[in-house]
Image (cartoon, rainbow, N blue to C red):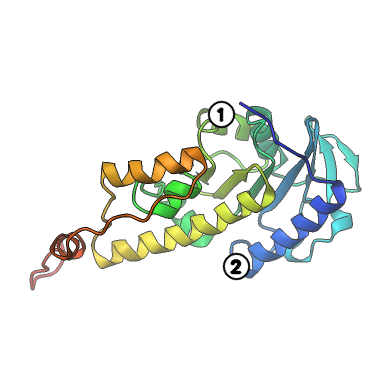
């Protein structure tokens, strides 16, 4: 698995992390001391948010540089309590340049229910992150994170954490952050579809058309519309009788 193409400078990474923390708060994806963000600065060190404190108020000088054993190299205080999770991801995925952990309400609701987001439903999910893994519960802030994540790290860019929250990764911080926003947006759409009575999956051919150019790094071609009658049948909710739901 190839590594990160280029590492950001410490100054650029500090500015970017602070911006993303504020964006996460503005979008309602974190509250209070929730969430943590890290960026790989080199093959053997990373920059991470500190433990505690509201992330919307975090300053560039509060971020800490740590090595891959979790030892603080630059900065004062303790690194994020979720550092073990970040380290486990970086150790297994040299292609990951940034990790974002948050508590997006709707996506976390799926995790609380013991569900992941259905695969093969929304083009945006297929193109931006693929299947979303559901990681079994582990006590936050403990080394158990590495064991819990291990079976899911290969081939996934987004993770729901049972009874906890969500984590997204990317080659860059922008990619990891965009995946977190898209994960929550998709969760809201899917919940709305369930309330309306149906989640209509894409066909195998439709999924393949999206996945092929995504693997090649191209933009998928616009799909050919199905006949109006077929579209209407696919999106018409089943009839509801006059009795109460059972």
Q: Residues within 10 Å of mark 1 (few under 14, many from 20)?
A: few
Disc tally is 2
Q: Position of residue 227 (x, y in %)?
A: 17, 61
Label 2 CA crowd tier, 10 Å (few <14, some 14–19, many 20+): few
Please report the residue visible at 61 percent of the width from the left and 44 percent of the height from the top.
169
Residue drawn at point x = 45 percent, y = 57 percent: 109
Q: Going by the picture, which residue comes out furthest to the top? A: 1
| For residue 125, side relative to residue 228 (left or right) | right
**Viewed as shown, does residue 123 lie left or right of 9?**
left
Judging depth in this view, the residue of 42 and 27 nearest the camera is 42
At horizontal 50% and vertical 59% (from top left) the residue drawn is 184
Residue designated by label 1: 150
Name the residue tied to disc 2: 27
Quadrant of the frame with the C terminus: bottom left
The residue tagged with tag 2: helix, strand or loop?
loop
Residue 218 in the figure: left or right of residue 224? right
Q: Is 172 situated above or below 87?
A: below
Residue 85, percent from left and from top: 65, 38
Q: Residue at x 68, y 29 (%)?
A: 91
Q: Nearer the viewer, mark 2 or mark 1?
A: 2
The front one of 109 and 203 is 203
As measured in the structure, the alpha-carbon distance from the residue carrying label 2 to the one carrying label 1 is: 29 Å
Mark 2 near mark 1, Cβ–Cβ under 8 Å?
A: no
Q: Residue furthest bottom?
A: 242
- The quadrant in which residue 62 appears is bottom right
Kindly tell me whether residue 135 is visible in this rendering: no
Q: Where is the N terminus found, in terms of image quarters?
A: top right
Circle 1 sits in a helix, a strand or a loop, which is it?
helix
Residue 40: image x %, image y %? Answer: 75, 40
């Amino acid at each position: 698995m190839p590594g990160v193409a280029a590492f950001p400078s410490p100054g650029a990474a500090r500015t970017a992390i602070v911006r993303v923390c504020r964006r996460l708060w503005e979008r309602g994806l974190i509250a209070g001391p929730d969430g943590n963000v890290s960026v790989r600065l080199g093959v053997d060190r990373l920059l991470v948010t500190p433990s505690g404190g509201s992330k919307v108020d975090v300053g560039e000088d509060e971020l800490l540089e740590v090595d891959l054993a979790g030892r603080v190299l630059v900065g004062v205080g303790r690194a994020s309590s979720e550092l073990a999770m970040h380290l486990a991801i970086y150790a297994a995925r040299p292609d990951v340049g940034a990790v974002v952990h948050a508590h997006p309400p709707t996506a976390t609701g799926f995790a609380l229910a013991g569900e992941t987001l259905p695969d093969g439903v929304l083009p945006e999910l297929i193109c931006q992150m693929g299947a979303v893994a559901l990681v079994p519960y582990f006590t936050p802030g403990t080394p158990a994170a590495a064991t819990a994540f291990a079976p899911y790290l290969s081939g996934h860019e987004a993770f729901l954490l049972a009874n906890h929250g969500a984590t997204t990764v990317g080659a860059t911080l922008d990619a990891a952050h965009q995946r977190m926003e898209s994960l929550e947006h998709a969760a809201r759409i899917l919940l709305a579809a369930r309330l309306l009575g149906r989640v209509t999956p894409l066909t195998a051919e439709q999924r393949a058309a999206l996945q092929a150019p995504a693997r090649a790094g191209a933009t998928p071609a616009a799909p050919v519309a199905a006949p109006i009658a077929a579209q209407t049948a696919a999106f018409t909710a089943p009839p509801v009788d006059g009795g109460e739901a059972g």
